[in-house]
Each structure stands twice: as structure tokens, then as C-alpha cells.
Amino acid sequence: MADAERVEGATARAETSYGDVAVSLDEDFVATVEIRRPPDNFFDVELIRSLGDAYEVLDAEPRCRAIVLCSEGKNFCAGADFTGRARGASAHGASWNAGDLYREAVRLFGTGTPVIAAVQGAAVGGGLGVACSADFRICTDRSRFAANFARLGFHHGFGLTVTLPLLVGHQRALELLYTGRRVSGPEAVETGLCDKLVDETELRTGAHAMAGEIARSAPLAVRSIRETMRGGLAEQIRRATAREREEQDRLRLTSDWVEGVRASSERRAPRFEGR
């Protein structure tokens, strides 16, 4: 587990940092877990490990009954940076280790505290997977979602095999995965991908209010209900990510993958050849 580092927040609340993840706990039993890699909050193994560390510590904290997951910057999470535009990543994802990443990702589904994701800007690719790991999602008119893997010549990941059909249904999940098209905030709420649409200025307030409603319920009862409803999810995610990882490794050797990443980096439409 990452070493925690205590700092004082602007509102005199103690913050605990796990890598690029900051945690604070309010007096109303609601914790805020903030990803701090602005503006796009690209993830890697270290970031997902930090999220898992934060969740597990809060899980053992009696004063925490619900978590608000949010991000600093323009976008909630733009997934993994395959293009190399951030943090010196390889343009072809050579440093990408899906096995390590997904072992850490399973931890997000294995804890017992309810999570509400406040999604500003984009939740794209693996970032959509992070958003879908939460119990609930709150968004705005300017939020947007995309399972854009096929547009990169890639197989989807982060357990979306399981989570996306649970939220939007099997047929709509197929359509979103096949096309990689963008979904707006209002459509996300209409289709069940998100649970509530709020004004952009009220995103975190709305997420905190929802978390507060949960925190006012009996904590033992909430955890018991969550275990009944979601207790098998971590094992489902473990099995799904094993298949997702195999296909990602296979497709990463294709010319279409190279073209998809190059086209994304150059901000143009890809020219796939099926090889």
C-alpha cells in the first residue's frame, strides 16, 4: 500500500494523499476521493493502485459511509494515454501492462463502501470503465462518454464487458462498443449510463448530496444490501478482464491498432484495413 502523506486542505480538513489521489473526510460520513492528474487525468497502473489503496483505507474507516469520486481538471478521466501526449507514454503503448492494471482495477469492485462518481467533461475508454466502477454516476450537459476502443483498433477493457450491459442493457452496450460513438450527458441519463443530470456548477454538490443520503441510512444495512447486490461483481470483473486482456494483447500486434493510435494522435479519422 502507498505511504500516506498528511497535508492541510483549504477548508482545514485533513487530506491524505496516495500518489495522485487525494482523500478527505467530512463530518457527514462522506469521503471525497479526487484524482489529481489534470487536465485529462490519464491513468496508469500506479493511479489505479492509488485508488484501490484509498478505497481500502476508507473501507476500514468507521466515519466513512459513502465516497464521492471526482477529478481535478477539464475531464473526469480520458483513460490510458496510448498516444503519448501525456507523461511521456509510448506512442504505441509499449509500456502498457494490462495484466498489472486489471489486477489493481479489480480492487475497486471488491470494497464495501458505496461510490458516487461526479463526471465532468469526458469519461472515455478506460475512463468510462472507472466511472462505471462506481455505484452511481452524476453528470452535466457538458459531460460525454465513449467506449472508443474499436475506433483505436482495440478491444474494450476495465471490466466494461460486465458493467456496461448492467447499466444500459446488452443491445445498447453492443452498439456503444461496436461504434465507439460519443454519448452526451442527457443521453447518458436517459439510457441509464448515468443516474442524475445537474448543472455544471452543482456537480460535486449534487454528488455529495447523493452520498449524504446514503450516509444517513444505517451503515451495516447499506453494506449488507450492497454485498447482496454487488458482492459477486469483483469476481465477474476478474474473469472479464482476463478475456479483455488477452484480446487487447492480440490486437495490439495488428496494423489496425497502430493506425488507430496514430490517427488519434494526429486527430484524424483512421483508415483501417482489417489486418
Image (spheres, rainbow, N blue to C red):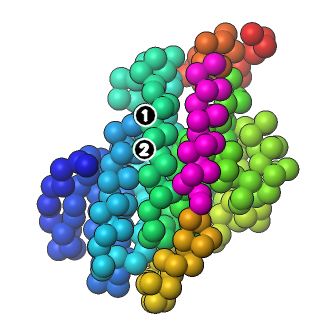
Label 2 sits on residue: 104
Q: Amino acid at mark 1?
A: Asp
Q: Measuring from the top left, give residue 174's x and y in whole percent.
A: 80, 43
SS at badge 2: helix
Q: Which portion, as a residue range, is magenta? A: 232-250
- Magenta segment, prevailing SS (helix, strand or loop): helix
Say how many tags the image has. Answer: 2
- In the picture, measured across the screen, residue 180 lies left or right of residue 91, that is right
Q: Measuring from the top left, give residue 40's x and y in whole percent.
A: 45, 42
Q: Nearer the viewer, residue 75 or 59?
A: 59
Q: Residue at x 48, y 77 (%)?
A: 223
Q: Which mark is residue 100?
A: 1
Q: Residues within 10 Å of mark 1 (few under 14, many from 20)?
A: some
Q: Residues within 10 Å of mark 2 (few under 14, many from 20)?
A: many
Q: Is residue 45 above or below residue 9?
A: above
Instruction: Give the spatial CA distance, label 2 vs label 1.
Output: 7 Å
Question: Is residue 172 at all visible to an observer of this figure?
Answer: yes
